Image (spheres, rainbow, N blue to C red):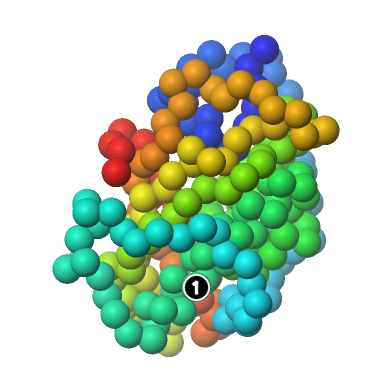
Amino acid sequence: MRRLGPSFLNHPLRDTTRSVVVRGLVGAALLATLGALLTACGNGGSAQTLDGASASPYSPPPPGLSSAKAVDGPVAVVVLRVYQGYWAAQIRAMATGRADGSDLSTYATGAALSESYADVVRLVSGGLRMAGAPRIRPVVTAVGSLPGARGESQATLQDCLDVSDWHQVTADGKGISEPDHRLLRYSLVVTARTVEGAWMISQVTRETGRTC
């Protein structure tokens, strides 16, 4: 039976044994649950209140993310802290199988938020949880005004996501085998934006066609 884990671990490029029947059933449950979660959480709180927030393990950017691309300054520092908070919230949600109370809606909005909730629902639907944590290596590469939104800003990050220490386990905590041909490290392109002045992660694009 195919194990239904989060998309960060079960990308179609390396797991093509999807069952059509299971996909339909899980998809229906996913839409219903996801809609309820998004309605309940709304826009979330401010991502600027990060004091004491636990962060995902962080390493310096790899050589492929040249320091020449990095944007420095106080805004970049805040964006990086928000991105760390976003991953810390995902780790909590996937370890417990609960998106509510994980702070995901504090750090993410739009597509990033809905995809994170969807990953949690997929995980729970498969009777799984996540143990350990991914390692992130982000760099802020651009900061500017958000087109069409007066007074709001956006930023772009590049990251090298390493999931080698982030493992699927059963809900009772027993280890299980990982998906076949699991890609352990690949690039992410991340968009952050301000929502009424508060920075939040709005989109995460996985570049699973290349490693980093």
Residue 184 rendering spot, x and y as whole percentages: 43, 35
Left or right placement of residue 63 versus residue 76 in this view: left
Identity of the residue drawn at 67% across and 12% down:
1
Label 1: which secondary element: helix
Is residue 47 depicted above or below 19 in this figure? below
Is residue 68 depicted above or below 136 in this figure? below
The image shows a total of numbered marks equal to 1
Residue 159 rendering spot, x and y as whole percentages: 36, 55
- Asked whether residue 30 appears in the rendered view, the answer is no
Mark 1, residues whose alpha carbon is within 10 Å: few (<14), some, or many (≥20)?
some
Identity of the residue drawn at 77% across and 57% down:
100
Residue 23 rendering spot, x and y as whole percentages: 65, 22
Q: Quadrant of residue 59?
A: bottom left
Is residue 172 depicted above or below 151 in this figure? above
Residue highlighted by disc 1: 81
Identity of the residue drawn at 49% across and 41% down:
163
Residue 119 rendering spot, x and y as whole percentages: 63, 42
Left or right placement of residue 141 versus residue 49 in this view: left
In depth, the one of 191 and 180 nearer the eye is 180
